[in-house]
Image (tube, rainbow, N blue to C red):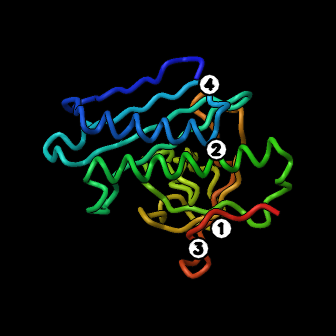
Amino acid sequence: MDTPLEIAFHNTEPSQYLEDRIRERVDRMHRRFSRINSCRVVVEVPHRSQANAQAFHVRIESRVPGKELVVSRDPGRHKAHFDPYVMVRDAFDAMERQLEQHSQEVRGDVKSRSAPMQGRVLRTFREHGFIATTDGREIYFHRNAVVDARFENLEEGTPVELCLVHGESPAGPQATTVRPISPLKLNPQPPKDR
């Protein structure tokens, strides 16, 4: 890597064991994808979780030539994700999937998606919300992006299809179209590229 690995702990005490595990996963990731320029990992306890210090959020930002890949993992309601080691494992698994897809794109092995991107509503606020995609990203959407339903009717866990636009926000891609779908239509794996 051109830039040394950055590891930050916010609202929680640093853990040498967790830091060692993060370094192991970054080393493994770098061995598989040698063109990583930088990597930053943040482990935090969100302010809303101060009463319950077990709820962790993990964010990984990796720069590769011409692109920044981001994985953001909230604990949600899954009890297993209150374990920081599980959160780190899942976040790095998602980052490795993104790196593999990027690597395929660079090699020209990937054409276009055969199906729309899917995910589940992670949380909503008054004017916007976030979707956890099946490939491990957390995507912002504005209430105006919702089609075939009302924004107010979206609940945490609602399965959706979405279309992304890149370059509109410094925070990363955002959804331009969000369409609720039936739970039976949700494919828990990211769509395969042909």
Q: Are dots 3 and 4 in contact, CB under 8 Å?
A: no
Q: What residue type is disc 3 on?
A: Leu
The tag earlier along the polypeptide, 3 or 1, is 1
SS class, disc 4: loop
Q: Quadrant of the C terminus?
A: bottom right
Label 3: few (<14), some or many (≥20) within 10 Å? some
Q: Nearer the viewer, mark 3 or mark 2?
A: 2
Using the numbered discs, state the Cα–Cα distance from disc 3 to disc 2 in whole angstroms: 23 Å
Percent position of residue 82, x then y: 25, 53
Q: What residue type is disc 1 on?
A: Asp
Q: Quadrant of the N terminus?
A: top right
The tag earlier along the polypeptide, 3 or 4, is 4
Q: Which disc, if any, is residue 37? A: 4
- The residue that label 1 is drawn on is 148
Percent position of residue 129, x then y: 49, 49
Label 4: few (<14), some or many (≥20) within 10 Å? some
SS class, disc 3: loop
Q: Nearer the viewer, residue 70 or 29?
A: 29
The tag earlier along the polypeptide, 3 or 2, is 2
SS class, disc 1: loop
Using the numbered discs, state the Cα–Cα distance from disc 3 to disc 1 in whole angstroms: 16 Å
Label 2: few (<14), some or many (≥20) within 10 Å? many
The structure residue drawn at horizontal position 33% and vertical position 54%, both measured from the top left corner, is 86
- The residue that label 3 is drawn on is 186
The structure residue drawn at horizontal position 42% and vertical position 47%, both measured from the top left corner, is 73
Q: Residue furthest front?
A: 31
Q: Are dots 2 and 4 in contact, CB under 8 Å?
A: no
Q: Are dots 3 and 2 in contact, CB under 8 Å?
A: no
The quadrant where residue 148 appears: bottom right
- The residue that label 2 is drawn on is 99
Using the numbered discs, state the Cα–Cα distance from disc 2 to disc 4 in whole angstroms: 12 Å
Q: Nearer the viewer, mark 3 or mark 4?
A: 4
